């Protein structure tokens, strides 16, 4: 997106890693700015939102990509409430808090909200309990807010993309024929963002199919 002329605000809770990522983008000629955001810390969210409102009032897109996985191998029945709450705090509550606080700015710019998600159907190969629960909530939030925006005639678009398995720190940098690199996943996401279509309420799989949760299938 930066290579298409966008200014990229890199929200990260780890300042040193956030600045490293920002500097890497700058080396590619991208206008990138680090913003400290910890989705488990409401004070950092409030500060970040006020910084964005004052310094970047033309914000037109929020991409909610931050997430923590919890223990991806532990059966659901072994999770403690504290472990589950930690994952939900970042992946759902913190994400909602940031989104809600930025709505006035995004609406004034006829903006878009993109949530990065995962399939939540049953699979013998991928069943991370807390992570899946949190992303199911994120998918529900995406579609419910889309309906709210439509009913209130708000000029906001909200949708989700499921880029598929991607090699990142979240999964221990897992690799394999079924995994994408981060740049590959990023290009897939950007291609959908720039396709000129209104995707509001859609949960889009990496192959372009849209999840139909009314029937538990892809349309």
Image (cartoon, grey):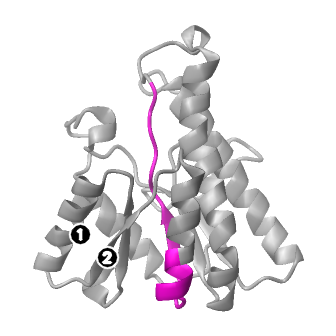
Residue at image x 68%, y 58%?
142
Tell me: 71 left or right of 131: left
Image location of residue 195, percent across then percent down: 46, 82
Tell me: 147 left or right of 158: right
For the residue labelled by badge 1, is the local secondary structure a helix, a strand or a loop?
helix
Residue 56, visible in the rendered structure: no
Tell me: 18 left or right of 42: left
209 relative to 49, above or below: above
Q: Magenta stretch: residue 58 in it?
A: yes
Residue 101, visible in the rendered structure: yes
Which of 132/218 is in front?
Answer: 132
The N terminus appears in which quarter of the rendering?
bottom left
Based on the displayed image, in which of its 4 quarters is residue 106 positioned?
bottom right
How far apart marks 2 and 1 lie (CA) works out to 6 Å
114 relative to 103, above or below: above
Image location of residue 65, percent across then percent down: 45, 56
Residue at image x 62%, y 52%?
211
Identify the residue position indicated by label 2 in the image.
33
Find the magenta span and give its range: 51-70
The C terminus appears in which quarter of the rendering?
bottom right
Identify the residue position indicated by label 1 in the image.
22
78 relative to 20, above or below: above
| Residue at the outermost right position | 151
Which of 102/147 is in front?
Answer: 102
Whether residues under marks 2 and 1 lie with C-beta atoms below 8 angstroms apart, the answer is: yes
Based on the displayed image, in which of its 4 quarters is residue 136 positioned?
top right
Which of 30/174 is in front?
Answer: 30
Residue at image x 23%, y 54%?
17
**Mark positioned earlier in the residue sequence (2 or 1):** 1
């Amino acid at each position: 997106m930066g290579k298409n002329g966008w200014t990229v605000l890199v929200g990260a809770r780890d300042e040193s890693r956030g600045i490293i990522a920002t500097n890497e983008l700058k080396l590619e000629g991208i206008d990138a700015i680090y913003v400290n955001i910890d989705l488990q810390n409401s004070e950092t969210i409030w500060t970040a939102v006020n910084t964005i409102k004052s310094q970047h009032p033309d914000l037109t897109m929020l991409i909610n990509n931050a997430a923590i996985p919890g223990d991806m191998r532990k059966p659901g029945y072994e999770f403690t409430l504290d472990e589950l709450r930690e994952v939900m705090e970042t992946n759902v509550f913190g994400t909602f808090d940031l989104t809600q606080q930025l709505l006035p700015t995004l609406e004034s710019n006829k903006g878009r909200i993109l949530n990065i998600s995962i399939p939540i159907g049953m699979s013998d190969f991928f069943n991370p309990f807390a992570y899946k629960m949190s992303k199911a909530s994120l998918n529900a939030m995406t579609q419910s807010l889309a309906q709210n925006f439509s009913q209130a005639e708000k000029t906001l678009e909200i949708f989700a993309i499921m880029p598929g398995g991607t090699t990142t720190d979240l999964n221990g940098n897992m690799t394999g024929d079924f995994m994408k690199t981060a740049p590959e996943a990023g290009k897939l996401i950007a291609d959908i963002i720039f396709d000129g279509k209104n995707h509001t309420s859609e949960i889009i799989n990496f192959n372009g199919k849209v999840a139909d949760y009314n029937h538990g299938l892809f349309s």
